[in-house]
Image (tube, grey):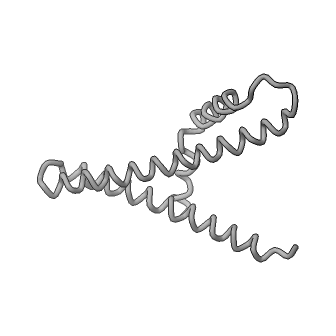
Amino acid sequence: MIDALSNIGRIGGADGMDALMQARLRALTPDVKAAPAAAAAQADTTSFLDALRKAAGDAVATLENSERVAMQGIRGEADIRQVVDSVMAAERTLSAAVAIRNKAVAAWLEISRMQI
């Protein structure tokens, strides 16, 4: 499970993710002097949502690619190494997605048990 979670930090690479967040912040933060905290909060929320959407899209693309390569392998059009590599990539992606889902469910259960 730790191995599955270690891939999450590499969504776009540490430098790529920082650059992506900075680009999103620049795009979402106009040159307005009023309410900079609200603009920063909106930019952070939006960039996190975009990162999740990108990660989900990449996961779906990996799974679809693996299915396509597996079908090519069945037809004899793909090398066995390519099939194994794509299936292993799909397995890692699915394990990471399940680990993220489990963490989200655990966090939701923890919040729901809190007394107000």
Q: Residue at x 47, y 48 (%)?
A: 57
In the displayed structure, 89 sits above or below 31; it is: below
Q: Quadrant of residue 67?
A: bottom left
Residue 76 spot, x, y in % from top left: 11, 53
Instruction: Note whether 110 is above or below 67 in the view shown.
Output: below
Residue 94 screen position, x and y as percent: 44, 60
Q: Residue at x 82, y 39 (%)?
A: 38
Q: Is residue 96 left or right of residue 88?
A: right
Task: Judge left or right: residue 52 versus residue 28.
Answer: left
| Residue 47 against residue 72 in the figure, above or below | above
Q: Residue 101 in the image: x percent, y percent? A: 56, 64
Position of 82 with respect to 112 (left or right) is: left
Nearer to us in this view, 32 or 43: 32
| Numbered marks: total | 0
Q: Residue furthest top?
A: 31
Q: Residue at x 25, y 49 (%)?
A: 82
Q: Quadrant of residue 45?
A: top right
Which residue is situated farthest in the left direction here?
A: 76
Where does residue 102 sit, x and y in percent of width and height?
58, 68
What residue lies at 39% left-to-right and 60% top-to-bottom? 91
**53 or 85, which lies in front?**
53
Q: Quadrant of the C terminus?
A: bottom right
